[in-house]
Image (cartoon, grey):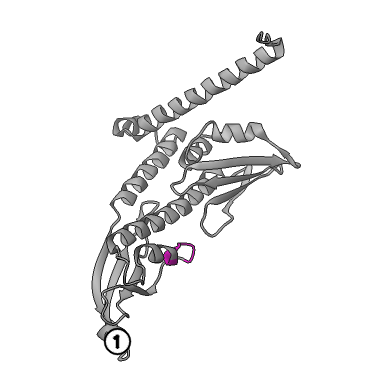
Amino acid sequence: MEESTPTPAQTLEDEISDLQTKLTSLKSQLSLQTSTLLSAPSTRSILPPQSPLLTQSNTQQSHNLQSLYRACASITTFRARDPDPNSVDNGSILGLRIDVVSRTKFLRPYYVLLNRPYPGSKHLRIHRHTVPPCIPLSGLAARYLPSDKEKKQDLVRFAKVLRREVTRYHHRLGVVADLREAAVGEEIVEVSAVDAEAKQVSFEWADGRIGRLVMGDDGEVEKLVVVVEGERDRETGRELLGGKVDVQEIVRRLSGGL
C-alpha cells in the first residue's frame, strides 16, 4: 500500500507544531536560567533599587526560602493527660504537633491527640485534632491506624503522610496568594481559590476573559483553560502555561509582566 503524500497544508501544520514545541522548550530553558541568575547573591548585589529585575529576584528568593522551610518543617510528639476523670486509659494522651511554614512564615501549628480506648490493646485512636477539614484525616487514620486488633498500626507513617498533606495544602494556599499578588492589576482583576482544598484557581480579566487552573498536590499545573465570550482562548492559555510547568513558574511569568 502506497503512503499518501502530505498536502502543503499538512506540511505547514507539522512545521508550525514543531516550531511551537521548540519554542516551549526554549521558554522552559530561559525560565530555568533566569531563576538561577536571579537567585545568585552576585546578581542581587548589582541590581539597582526599585528595579523590575530586583522585584523578580525578591520573588524568586521568597520562593526558594519557602521551599527550604517546607523541607525543614518538623513534626514532634509529646505526652499529655486528659483532665476528664472519666477519660479512657487513665487520661493518657499522645500528641502530634505539626509545624507548618507558608510564604517564609511559621503558622500556628496543628495538633492531633491520640488515646488508647480499647481495653487490652495498644491500638491508638484519634481523640481530638485541629487539622483543617479538607485534609482527609479519617481516611489516613483508617489506613494507618486501623482499629482492627488483627491489623498493625503504623503511627510513624501516619504522621509523615499527614504532615505531607498539611504542608501541600498550605503550599497551595501560598501559591494562590502569590498568584494574586503577581497578577492582579490593570489586566487581571481577580485571582481566587474556588474549592476548599485550594486545588482550583479562578482568574478574571478586565476584558471579560475567565480562566480556571487546576493544581496537583504539589503545585504542578494539571489543567489551564481560558474562556472569552463562551469560546476557549487558546493563545492566552498558551502564553500563561507555555508547556508543562508548576504554578510558581506562572507566578514568575506574571511578575515579569506577561
Residue at image point 40% right, 51% down: 103
The residue nearer to you, when weighing 82 against 108, is 82
Left or right: residue 18 versus residue 41 is right
The N terminus is located in which quarter? Answer: top right
Residue 203: where, in percent of width, then height?
61, 46
Above or below for 18 versus 113:
above
Give the residue drawn at x 47%, y 37%: 249
Question: From this viewpoint, which residue is outermost toward the right?
Answer: 229
Secondary structure of the residue carrying numbered label 1: loop
Give the residue furthest to the left: 79
Q: Which residue is located at x 35 percent, y 70 percent?
A: 112
Q: Amino acid at mark 1?
A: Pro
- The front one of 172 and 66 is 172
Residue placed at 65% from the left, 40% from the top? 226
Tell me, yes or no, if residue 34 can be seen here: yes
Of residues 247 and 141, which is closer to you in this image? 141
Q: Start and end of the magenta stretch?
A: 133-138
Left or right of 151 on screen, residue 24: right
* Secondary structure mainly formed by the magenta segment: loop
Instruction: Give residue 52's position: percent from left, percent from top.
Output: 47, 35
Q: Determine if residue 50 is in view.
A: no
Query: Looking at the picture, does residue 247 appear above or below residue 96?
Result: above
Residue farthest to the bottom, as pictured = 85
Name the residue tied to disc 1: 83
From the viewer's perspective, tell me whether residue 44 is left or right of residue 206: left
Quarter of the image with the C terminus is: top right
Outermost residue toward the front in this view:
1
